[in-house]
Amino acid sequence: MARVDYTERIPNNVSLAENRRLLRALEEWRPRYLDWWQQMGPDGFQAKDVYLRTAISVDPQGWAHFDWVKMPEYRWGIFLAEPEPGRSIAFGEHKGTPAWQEVPGEYRGTLRRLIVTQGDTEPASVEQQRHLGRTCPSLYDLRNIFQVNVEEGRHLWAMVYLLHAHFGRDGREEAEGLLQRRSGDSDKPRILGAFNEKTPDWLSFFMFCFFTDRDGKYQLASLAESGFDPLSRTCRFMLTEEAHHMFVGEAGIGRVVQKTCELMREHRTDDVRRHGGIDLPTMQKYLNFHCSVSLDLFGSEISTNAANFYTAGLKGRFEETKKTDDHLLKEATYSIAVPDGDAVKMAEEPALLALNERLRDDYIADCQRGVDRWNATIKRHGIDLVLRLPHRGFHRAIGNFAELRVSPDGRIVSQAEWDARKHDWLPTPEDEAYVASLMTPVVEPGKFAGWIAPPTRGINGQPVEFQYVKLTPRE
Ligand SMILES: [Fe+2]
Ligand SMILES: [Fe+2]
């Protein structure tokens, strides 16, 4: 089993010590990464001990080590899932041939672009979240955001490793570029739209983890099918860390829902703002926003790029190897939603061209499972309201619906109706100001802000009231 030396500067299971050239390149990149982390990583808290998990192997039985770490001293390592002996390419025109251990020349540019686009999202989210520590609703949540942040940093390392190891000078230049772009910067923005949005408060953070990180899960899952084996193995291990990010989002929103329901019952009112809670209609508006910007990340419904990635064997479908069709999709069709007058109808399109939409469908089904769990909480409190995912056409900037105005329930509406109703559908400046007004830090162990319920259990078997971040030195 590929156990690693946890004391190494760059813990890894890729035999870095035996590849001096690569080791040197990564060691040269490392101080620039640390500069970026100091500049753009969590604002404050860099000298504090945080109870973090660090990946120390890829052993499913125990890949994580929990300990007190100052974030700049986190061991950002490089881990690829164990190779599958004899793995072959599962789809596209190279189906059945051995997976590539080196980049095929003909796909060099395309693969590099896929890796850079994925890699760019990792530091972007750290940048988006950098001020949130200052307003944490609890030490437990503070630790969780830092955990997500350091792991997004490790995901950047994962992509930079591939660039350095397999793409020569171009790869090294791209690795620098990943440290130079900045979320929301007008001159050098991050590549994808949702990663240039602001994450100004913790409700947005939980929504981001639920919706936007989940896009990451689906992109990683389809890259985990790649015929380029090092990319596949990297993504497979990243997905194990990603599961925690999904948990932070879903449980975070779940705890806000829980608290809101408790306040509604206790005070026999829907107007929980008077009692310091976040009312369900406001949560619905945040949900609408974050869902819609995340849906855009999947790209256009009809995409020749997606078809080419698939045919070339670079990016598969979600759970490609579990599907029982021909894995070529030359004849198959797939039904997608298209605008038709003021309604939306379904149309059959070539499956190969509709791969983005198919991945978006898998994603939406996954999101719905989380929404159902929140609704079960609402129902348990005897409250007659359900949270809903907005229609896929709502508030879109990319694809068939980008030029249209679509209500959350899927009607194509006039600009006039949109203008009159959009305040019911998306957070208003007043909503945002209200949520911002709740963001006062709570840092006493075991205490939680008044708008969110405590979790049912702590991290790694520790109690909820554990001092997850040592803000004041104490032994
Ligand atoms: Fe990530
Ligand atoms: Fe993530």
Image (cartoon, rainbow, N blue to C red):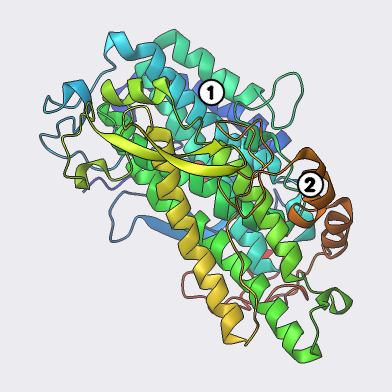
Q: Is residue 80 or residue 282 the one in the foreground?
A: 282
The mark found on residue 417 in the picture is 2
Quarter assignment of residue 302: top left
> Horizontal placement of 447 versus 402: left or right?
right
- Residue flagged by tag 2: what amino acid is it? Glu
Judging depth in this view, the residue of 203 and 131 nearest the camera is 203
CB of mark 2 near ligand 2 (< 8 Å):
no
In the picture as drawn, the residue positioned furthest to the front comes out as 341
Q: Residue at x 28, y 48 (%)?
A: 3
**Residue 91 badge:** none
What element does badge 2 sit on? Answer: helix
The percent position of residue 228, horizontal first and vertical second, equals 27, 26
Q: Residues within 10 Å of mark 1 (few under 14, many from 20)?
A: some
Q: Residue at x 84, y 49 (%)?
A: 420
Quadrant of the rendering where the C terminus is positioned: bottom right
Front: mark 1 or 2: 2
